[in-house]
Amino acid sequence: MKLKSKQSKITRRQQFKLFLSIMASFAVLFLTLGLIIFNLFQSSTYKSIDKDMREQIASVKKQPNMQKQDDSNPGPDHPVQQNKPNPKMPFQASILVFDDNGKLLNKSSLGNRYSALKNINLNKKILTRNKPSLFII
């Protein structure tokens, strides 16, 4: 009887050690895979956002110079009306174009968002002379 109880104690202790080692190895495995997936997701998200922002900057640079536009409704062939939102964009971005005096130049391209964005002022302190600044709201 003593021999059986001694063997069962040894067996239970060995089973417990094996259980802990298997649980630890699975924890390490899932943690490693989780970190790999998180890093891949984070880098692909940032790359996608950077690519979309570069496209937005390029489209702003391609726009014609919008000096002193009147607030009347331009025709459909007007360059401002041709600037339609890009349906591929995963988020809605509003591009505000200011003149040197801080006046908003692209009122007509903002559409119904103008009423919400008209109170935003240009902060000239954060602008640099050599680099174009893009503020996405």
Image (spheres, grey):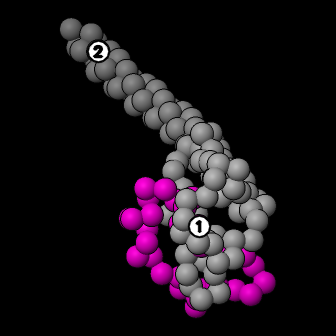
Q: Residues within 10 Å of mark 2 (few under 14, many from 20)?
A: few
Q: Residue at x 65, y 87 (%)?
A: 100
Q: Mark 1 is on which residue type?
A: Asn
Q: Amino acid at mark 2?
A: Ser
Task: Return the residue nearer the eye: 54 or 35.
Answer: 54
State how far apart marks 1 and 2 are (Cα): 82 Å
Residue 116 percent coordinates (x, y): 38, 65
> Which residue lies at the image location 27% right of the left edge and 10% below the top edge?
4
Residue on which disc 1 sits: 106
Can you tell which of label 1 and label 2 is closer to the viewer?
Answer: 1
- Crowd rating for badge 1 (residues with CA inside 10 Å; few <14, some 14–19, many 20+): many
**Residue 111 percent across, percent down from the top left:** 49, 56
Q: What is the x, y in percent for residue 15?
A: 37, 21
Q: With respect to residue 108, does 105 lie above or below? A: below
Q: Which residue is mark 2?
A: 8
Query: In the drawing, does residue 102 fall left or right of residue 5?
Result: right
Q: Residue at 54% across / 56% down in the picture?
A: 93
First in sequence: mark 1 vs mark 2: 2
Residue 14: name its quadrant.
top left
Let me know if residue 117 is in the magenta part. yes
User: Percent from the top left, x then y, of residue 97?
Assistant: 61, 71
* Left or right of residue 65, residue 13 in this image: left
Residue 94 in view here: no
Label 2, secondary structure: give it.
Answer: helix
Along the line of sight, which residue is nearer the eye, 81 or 127? 81
Extreme left residue here?
Answer: 1
The span shown in magenta is 105-133
